[in-house]
Image (cartoon, rainbow, N blue to C red):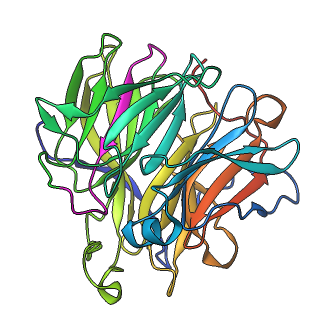
Amino acid sequence: MDGKIAVAAGLACVFLSGCALMQPQGILAEGAKWEEISRAGRVFGEGVVAAKDGRLYMTDIMPTAAVKENNTGGTIWRYDPASGRAEKYMEPSGMANGLHVDRNGDLLIAQGSDTGGRAILRRNLTTGATQVVANAYQGRRLNSPNDVTSDAQGRLYFTDARYIGMDPMELPNAVYRVDRDGRITRIIADLFRPNGVEVSPDGRRLYVANNGSRGLPINPNGPPKDRFGVIAGDVIAYDLDANGAVSNGKAILRSETVGPDGMALDTDGNLYVAMHNGNPKEPKSDIVVLNPAGQVIERLPLPNNALSTNLGFGRGADSGTLYATSALPWRLWRIKTVRRGHYFE
């Protein structure tokens, strides 16, 4: 995509003392509070998504030191809301990060770098059959796929940005589209570190979390004392046409102290954004809800500033439950809403 990102009028702000909310528009069920429901993972929770049968899948990302300590290259966990039990679904996971369930019910897996697969995989949840959807662009290996989503036509969109690992980078950080015939197109290449990605329920917008665009980006390869800088960033809304092309990128959310990570949508088009500073010693975190006009209508921070990393709604009778992963340490949370989660069926 050519051209600079515009700043939307009435740009939402977060973590600023003078930032007021719009009138709350009925997000939470009466008396609802965040509930911690699992401590199954170890390090960095991510990628929570519900399959068509209602079971949840989420990841545990393990940087090199944790991989050596735990003898694994990451884990995909499966959680059953009916029983409250979590079990390992895939280990090693190839450093799986973001997850997505498409309209066919397949699990899309974004495998990162640092002992990972550096690929987008499609896995049949019934048979376990797995295929590589994308691992290169124009003959060059992807850096570290971070998150993945799809639209009503079955096209995939994924972000590719290096956060950890020392694998050689052959491509700029970018956002890609995968058409149904398997053709891969780079559609956005001017963001610092694209992260979460979502398509609006009407299919007319692509939302991308742009992490670390201001402040001091993380230095993942440095000593521990230097790894935690200020993660700041934006959420960018792009017009999305019938062919999956993007245009007119506008920043609808901006933060100077916490960076946007994973996102989710409800059926009314409200966007839920997990945000954190990546620093467990001095944590700052938030979950911000924006309406389709880009206005902040609710804030749902996790207890004790737990570092909120990703979000996903349940399915079926559980579709009004919002789930969140957090990191350093790994946790899974839920809260009841009066909305219904959006999935392309």
**Horizontal placement of 316 versus 143: left or right?**
right
Please tell me which residue is depicted at 30% across the width and 49% down the height of the picture: 144
The stretch drawn in magenta includes residue 138: no
| Along the viewing direction, whichever of 191 and 99 lies nearer the viewer | 99
Q: Position of residue 62 (x, y in %)?
A: 46, 63
Please tell me which residue is depicted at 21% across the width and 25% down the height of the picture: 185
Image position of 258 with respect to 58: above or below: below
The stretch drawn in magenta includes residue 158: yes
Q: Which residues are magenta?
A: 152-167
The picture quadrant where one finds residue 145 is top left
Q: Report the quarter where the N terminus lies.
A: top left
What kind of secondary structure does the magenta stretch mostly adopt? loop
Q: Report the quarter where the C terminus lies.
A: top right
Image position of 159 with respect to 297: above or below: above
| Along the viewing direction, whichever of 320 and 221 lies nearer the viewer | 221
**Horizontal placement of 318 versus 268: left or right?**
right
Q: Position of residue 318 (x, y in %)?
A: 80, 37
Residue 1 seen anywhere in this rendered image of the structure: no
